[in-house]
Amino acid sequence: MRNDEKKLYGQYVREVRERLGMYREEFGELLGGLSGETIRHVEGGHQNLGKTAMAAVERLASADVRETPPAYRVRIPDSPTLTPERAADLMLDEKLRAQAAAVATALGCDLRKAMTIVIENRLENS
């Protein structure tokens, strides 16, 4: 990415984060455990995000909060369907629950939809 493209993309990332009402640290966690400092560098146009983090930004930017698919139907590209047992394990993770609560508040969606977004991101990064 050229420098001017990095700056434009960084502005976009910041707009998405601010629309969600999140601190850099919270947003970085949703993008796969990135630090707040990394998000600051991206927003400033000094650093690129990886493909997975860029995809997560797009998901968060375009999250459709009207539809809430069941967790067991979540499909990850090139991955098997998430089983109800695995979903339950992920839902018991306190850190994921806190992230989902933040996403639900930011997007104004229900906790189930927010948990789906957070779990998709976690599975893509594992």
Image (cartoon, rainbow, N blue to C red):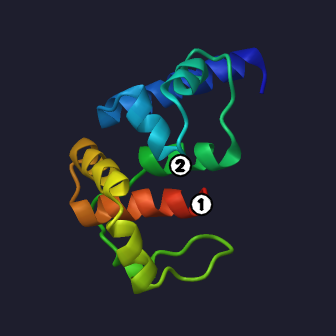
Mark 1 residue type? Glu
Residue under the point 48% across and 26% down: 36
Number of numbered tags placed on the structure image = 2
Residue position for label 1: 124
Relative placement, left or right, of 14 versus 19 is right
Separation (CA) of disc 2 from disc 1: 9 Å
Residue under the point 67% across and 16% down: 46
Residue 38, how many percent across, how many down?
58, 25
Mark 2 residue type? Ala
Residue under the point 27% across and 66% down: 112
Extreme residue in the right direction = 2
Q: Nearer the viewer, residue 29 or 18?
A: 29
Residue count near mark 1 (Cα–Cα under 10 Å), binned few <14, some 14–19, many ≥20? some
Residue count near mark 2 (Cα–Cα under 10 Å), binned few <14, some 14–19, many ≥20? many
Residue 81, how many percent across, how many down?
54, 82
Name the image quarter holding residue 15: top left
Q: Earlier in the sequence, mark 2 or mark 1?
A: 2
Are discs 2 and 1 less than 8 Å apart at CB?
yes
Q: Nearer the viewer, mark 2 or mark 1?
A: 1
Q: Which element is circle 2 on? A: helix
Q: Quadrant of the C terminus?
A: bottom right
Q: Nearer the viewer, residue 5 or 32?
A: 32
| In this view, 57 is above or below 85 | above
Residue position for label 2: 56
